[in-house]
Image (cartoon, rainbow, N blue to C red):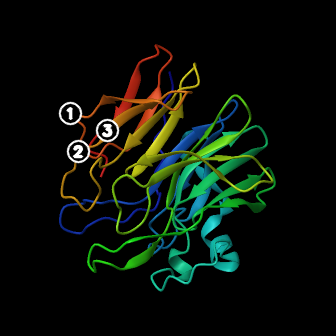
Amino acid sequence: MRAATVTGLGSIAHPDDGGFAFGPDDISFQGRGGAYVAVGGCGLVPGGGCGELIRLKSKGTWQTIADLNAYEADNNPDETTNPDRTPRLASDPFAVLALPGEQLVVDAVGNDLLRVAANGEISTLTVFPQRFVDDPSSPGTQILMDAVPTSVALEPDGAFYVSELTGHPFPAGVARIYRVVLGEEPQIYAEGFTNVVDIAFEGDGSLLVVEIAKNSLLSGDQTGALIRLKPDLTRETLLSEGLTMPTAVAIGKDHALYISNCGV
């Protein structure tokens, strides 16, 4: 087995302890040697692929496939006017799904699902809506909450499923999973989750759902959860105890489930 280390990728973290690091968010493989990485959340760092979709090459090198941050800054598909969003922080590519001849990218800041064609051309497949929710700091009032999509999975029926973390104030029980058919508005597939950070399909059509903080990111409780959402939309919690801000799940060839824990 040959191994190579990819270096030189952008990242940013808390200067004291390295906590809450941002940088390479997701990786997806397609074909022989086709490894695509979404590098997001580090737009204040010049270079390093920040805000871009990159492809890993042999001997630890990489190349930019698409500048997603530039696309979001120029087009702003969700039409938000958030003052915290600047041209350098217009995008946070958080998940990538590599398919034959194209890659799909979930943009957590852009609140959209993007397509990157084989020639690197970027297009918007769909935008996930903002919603009004109760403002915990001002009882009786509501504020707009971003969707903050976090993961995309392809179901055997050909539709795409996208999870949402939700934005501030990160309320419990309001995160959704959308079903996306190309050319149509996204439809709510399931709801009632909290701060979903990853999803993955099992062979029987059940959907694994990872909540990074099952009681909300603002609760002070860092306990996460792994939930199985069955095709009939019933659900069961597979694991919670011992999960501290988990960030991803994968299904191995041995059919075991692998979870990244303490992900922040």
CA separation in Å, label 2 and label 1:
7 Å
Under tag 2, what secondary structure?
A: loop
Q: Which residue is nearer to you in this view: 141 or 107?
A: 141
Q: Which of the labelled discs sits on residue 225, or is there none? A: 3
Q: Is residue 41 left or right of residue 96?
A: left
Q: Residues within 10 Å of mark 2 (few under 14, many from 20)?
A: many
Which residue is drawn at the image coordinates 26% and 34% (left, top)?
240
Q: Are marks 2 and 3 in contact (CB under 8 Å)?
A: yes
* Residue 202 circle label: none
Nearest the camera: 132 or 251? 132
Q: Position of residue 76 (x, y in %)?
A: 65, 76
Query: How much space separates mark 2 and mark 3, taking CA atoms?
Result: 7 Å
Query: To which residue does mark 2 refer?
Result: 223
Label 1 belongs to which residue?
Answer: 241
Identify the secondary structure beneath mark 1.
loop
At label 1, the amino acid type is: Glu
Q: Position of residue 52 (x, y in %)?
A: 59, 61
Name the residue nearer the viewer: 144 or 41.
Answer: 144
